[in-house]
Amino acid sequence: MCSTKKNSSAGFTLLEMLVAIAIFAMLGLASNAVLQTVMHNDEVTKDFSNKLKAMQQGFGALERDFGQMVARTPRLVDGGRGTSVFQTGSDILDSESEALVFFRLGWLNPDGILPRGSIQSVAYVVRENNLERWYYPYPEPEFGSDPIKTIVMRDVISVEYSFFVNEKWERKVDGAELPKAIAMEIELEGLGKIQRKFLLPVGAKPGSGSDSNNGGNNNGGNNNGGNNNGGNNNGGNNNGGNNNGGNNNGDGSDENGRDKGNG
């Protein structure tokens, strides 16, 4: 008789290997697709986060400027004063959309180191799809001087302003007085239209400080010797004639006019 031994250590067949390789390949492709999707979503999220952060920083700068807006008229070339405390429109400063020009307080100058005050002339202009903040070193800049420019927001399509005056929102105003609030609608690429409203400080009307708190009402005419001097609070009313012992006048005489100095 002839006996045969079976090999108990037989391996995988070629078909089984091909099936295993196909399964691993499909798993690898699926994992790669998931990884690419996660990486793309991460990039989109970072880009959106950066745009949102830049937008919030831009609105923060706008809020600081609007919060210290002051009713100040610009000085004209002939030395006089204008009638508007702010200007707006799409036809000023070569802006691609609506621009806004105004004055603000609170420009820091510690210990008066710099030769300027705390009032700053500010303009918001759209140039090359960027919202830029312009300001000059002095409130009345020299003719032909260039402003200092800072990009506040990028990818700006359009900007529109509305002003709350006379208890209603108006798109067009003359700028003769400060509104109670300013609404800004800005359209950004990839984010759409966004509207923010800013409350303005309640300040004095332009020119009111020159007539209501000057020397004409708070000087010597009403608070000087004319009403609080020797005429009303001197020897005539508060002297020896009315405020002494026994109506003793300042000239040393008693009520009968006799000289007490002579005994």
Image: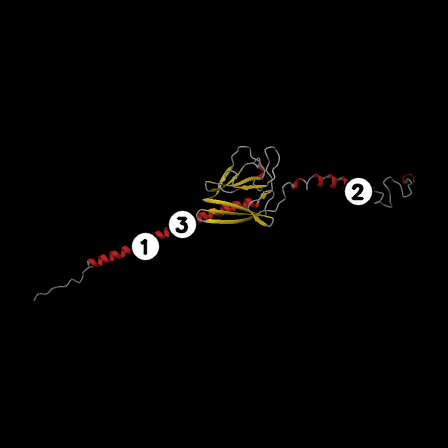
Q: Could you say whether the residue bearing mark 3 is in a helix, strand or loop?
A: helix
Q: Which mark is residue 232?
A: 2
Q: How far apart are marks 1 and 3 (CA)?
A: 20 Å
**With 225 as the anchor, is 109 left or right in this view?**
left
Quarter location, residue 108: top right
Please report whichever mark, 2 or 1, sits nearer to the chain's N-terminal start: 1
Tell me: 103 left or right of 7: right
Q: Do the residues labelled 2 and 1 touch (CB within 8 Å)?
A: no
User: Which residue is pictured at 74% across the width and 39% down the height?
Assistant: 221
Query: Does the image show residue 103?
Result: no
Image quarter where the N terminus lies is bottom left
Q: Mark 3 points at which residue?
A: 44
Mark 2 element type:
helix
Closest to the observer: 165 or 232?
165
Q: Position of residue 74 (x, y in %)?
A: 59, 38
Marks 3 and 2, how far apart at CA: 81 Å
Assess whether mark 3 and mark 1 are in contact (beta carbons under 8 angstroms).
no
Give the x, y percent position of residue 50: 44, 47
In space, the residues marked 2 and 1 are separated at their CA atoms by 99 Å
Which of the two discs, 1 and 3, labels the residue nearer the N terminus?
A: 1
Which dot marks residue 178? none
The amino acid marked with disc number 2 is Asn
Between disc 3 and disc 2, whose residue precedes?
3
Amino acid bearing label 1 = Ser
* Along the viewing direction, whichever of 58 and 263 lies nearer the viewer: 58
**Labels 2, 1: front one:** 1
- Which quadrant is home to the C terminus? top right
The amino acid type, in three-letter code, at marker 3 is Val
Residue that label 1 marks: 31
Q: Residue furthest left?
A: 1
